[in-house]
Amino acid sequence: MKQQTAVVLAGFLAVMAVGHDVQAKSLEDILKEKGVITEAEFKEASKAKPYDYKLGKGFVLTSPDQKFQLQIGGQIQAQYEFDDYDLASKQDVSQFNLRRVKTLLSGYAFTKDLTYKATYNWANVVKENTKAMEEVNLKYRVADELQIMLGQEKIQYSRQWITSNTAQQFVDGSFVRNAFMQGYDTGINLHGDLWSGVVKYDAGLFGGAGQNTKNKTNDNAYNFRVAVNPLGDMKYGEGDLEYSEKPLVSLGSSYYLNTLRKTVSGTGTTATSAIDNNNSNFVTDTNGWLGKAVKGKYFGTAAAEEISVDSWEADFAFKWLGASMQGEYFWGKAEGDISDKELIARGGYLQAGYFVIPKRLELALRYAWMDPNRAISNDSISEIQGAVNYFLYGNNLKIQGDVGNRHTYKDKTDDLVARAQVQLLF
């Protein structure tokens, strides 16, 4: 059955990949290429118009005085997934899914230094309504070295999480990233690009309760990140779609600190412990490194226990002439003040890709591993995945597919997951 699924997926990708590469060009581009207008005339004609369209950014509306601008775009990821489980007690699944359906609003007001963003994921209205509203914030640029964000954004932790899901080599991020990342939160973040992007930093103070959730305690979350790009600025995007003519390297590290409160519902043996009023990904995700332990009563069932959380990660990325590699190592520690329990979780992934046809066809491979609790033996999970990506209009229109085998050491099971996805960004 697993081989049949892989064949079907490969066939699906081959059919979907048939298409013509006709890149839309503006009238100004055509006239410049034919030598009808000069470079200076091209720049003058390309100045902000009352309304315009930019591929990948959407429709652009600009006021006559150019003090206000609104970009309206969207994203659709239509996905097929097949899950073939080893355990007879688990039902195999064959499903079509709208993974992400987003409305993207952004622009500037009064000055180009004051920008705003609002992202709404319609796919979450049905399955996870509390996570439908994603990035909603204001940013003010004092200088390249100091920019201030107010509102809700991605916690700048984990290279793969910071990278847009539209610019990733696999249909979705690694399960290890999902287990350790915090997700979105509301607060203030200071960001800066030093020496033309050679060094980037973030320092944030957040509510600590996660996406679209108000904090009910006096404890907040702190996040810090630094990335060094010794060979020049390296944008967040997986794979070398740009076919970099010179090698690019990035080294980064992030740290997250928070204190969470535990609550208990039910009585006696039916009591279930949970984190009070928290919508952070590492708590709510099915394999979240902390949430899984709390739900499993690792910290006991005492109510109002405070759990101190420290989480750290280190990452690297490399690109050159269509080849790419990146990896991350995660480490998380949680301590309960009543149960005196300590939880240490670890994990990481390494992935590499190569464009066998530059800017068109990419192959990628990823290995991921996680130990959700160092105190418990034989509870690790590992996964190996292979992916193929076909780009029709860069990341704006591409077809992706991946097949992976996830091994659970405790149950000694191997589960196959095959996915295919078409992405449209406009």
Image (cartoon, rainbow, N blue to C red):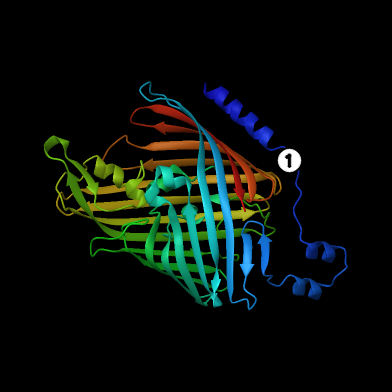
The answer to whether residue 379 is visible is yes
Q: Nearer the viewer, residue 357 or 324?
A: 357
The answer to whether residue 352 is above or below residue 115 is above
Neighbor class of circle 1 (other Cα within 10 Å; few <14, some 14-19, many 20+) is few
Q: Mark 1: which secondary structure?
A: loop
Visible residue check, residue 374: no
Describe residue 351's horizontal placement relative to residue 26 as left or right: left
Judging depth in this view, the residue of 140 and 132 nearest the camera is 132
Q: Position of residue 81 (x, y in %)?
A: 51, 33
Q: Is residue 358 left or right of residue 124?
A: right
Tell me if 121 is positioned left or right of 319 in this view.
left
Horizontal and vertical percent position of residue 255? 37, 60
62 to 286, vertically: above or below: below
- Say left or right for 268 vs 415: left
Q: Nearer the viewer, residue 247 or 18?
A: 18
- What amino acid does circle 1 point to? Gly
Q: In x, y percent, where is residue 137?
A: 45, 66
Residue at the image point whose x is 63% and y is 31% from the top: 12
Q: How many marks?
A: 1
- Residue at image mark 1: 19
Q: Position of residue 112 (x, y in %)?
A: 57, 75
**Residue at x-position 79% and y-position 71%:** 42
Examine the rendered structure and indicate whether residue 215 appears above or below residue 96.
below
Query: Could you tell me which residue is drawn at 51 percent across and 65 percent down?
Result: 228
